[in-house]
Image (spheres, rainbow, N blue to C red):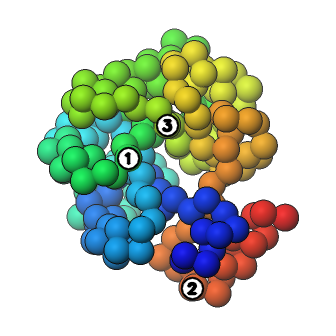
Amino acid sequence: MRALSRFWKVIASFDDAFRSAASVFPALERLGVPIEIFVCSGYARDGASLAIPELAGDDPEELATMSWDDLLGHADRGVLIGSHTVSHPHLTELSDDELRRELNDSKAEIEDRLSRVCSDLAYPYGEHDERVRLAARGAMYERAYALRRPRGGDYALPRLDLYRRHSVPRTLLRAVASRA
């Protein structure tokens, strides 16, 4: 991992604030890899399981999210906390008012609950368009991360999505291919 960081800025980020993600934090911290959790503020209120149609049928225990107390503990140890909206919607499909609420309310709740500035946004599903990027800027995020069509300045910074099914060689190939 340290060798990779010579070529790329490596930050381990975790969407959805699943409780299970915390199991790898000690190893990442030992390696000196910065960690950022992107939280859906509506789920953090009670650590509810992420309930979105794309995950219907998955084990609710695996989808359990971190509560505000969990997130505060991680933030106190130096883990960055960013927004993943309030409810994990497809942002490009929302009305202007719904979009504004998802972005502004999540940022405000994170800042209120953690007493820290929330600078970063990760678009749910990595989806964005010009209207969504402008809304993120209007909500006063400093930067936002995307998965598809990431070349949009500070409001469509590239991220590489990785899942448990990806082996180490496949992860490295995906990382190299994403830089091409």
Q: How many numbered marks are there? A: 3
| Mark earlier in primary sequence (3, 2) | 3
Residue 41, image x, y percentages? 32, 35
Above or below residue 131? Residue 72 is: below
Q: Nearer the viewer, residue 18 or 114?
A: 114
Secondary structure beneath dot 3 equals: strand
Above or below residue 32? Residue 154 is: above
Residue 163, image x, y percentages? 52, 71
Can you say which quadrant of the picture contains the C terminus?
bottom right
- Residue under label 2, please give it: 167
Q: Amino acid at mark 1?
A: Leu
Can you say which quadrant of the picture contains the N terminus?
bottom right
Please rate how many residues cluster around mark 2, counting C-alpha atoms within 10 Å: few if below 14, some from 14 to 19, many from 20: few
Relative to 60, is 54 on the left or the right? right
Nearer mark to the viewer, of 3 and 2: 3
Above or below residue 103? Residue 55 is: below
| Mark earlier in primary sequence (2, 1) | 1
Nearer mark to the viewer, of 2 and 1: 1
| Mark earlier in primary sequence (1, 3) | 1
- Residue under label 1, please give it: 80
- Give the residue furthest to the top: 97
Mark 3 touching mark 2, by CB under 8 A? no
Numbered mark located on residue 120 in the image: 3
Secondary structure beneath dot 2 equals: loop
Mark 1 touching mark 3, by CB under 8 A? yes
Q: Amino acid at mark 3?
A: Asp
Numbered mark located on residue 25 in the image: none
Relative to 175, is 19 on the left or the right? left
What residue is drawn where x is 66% and y is 20%? 134
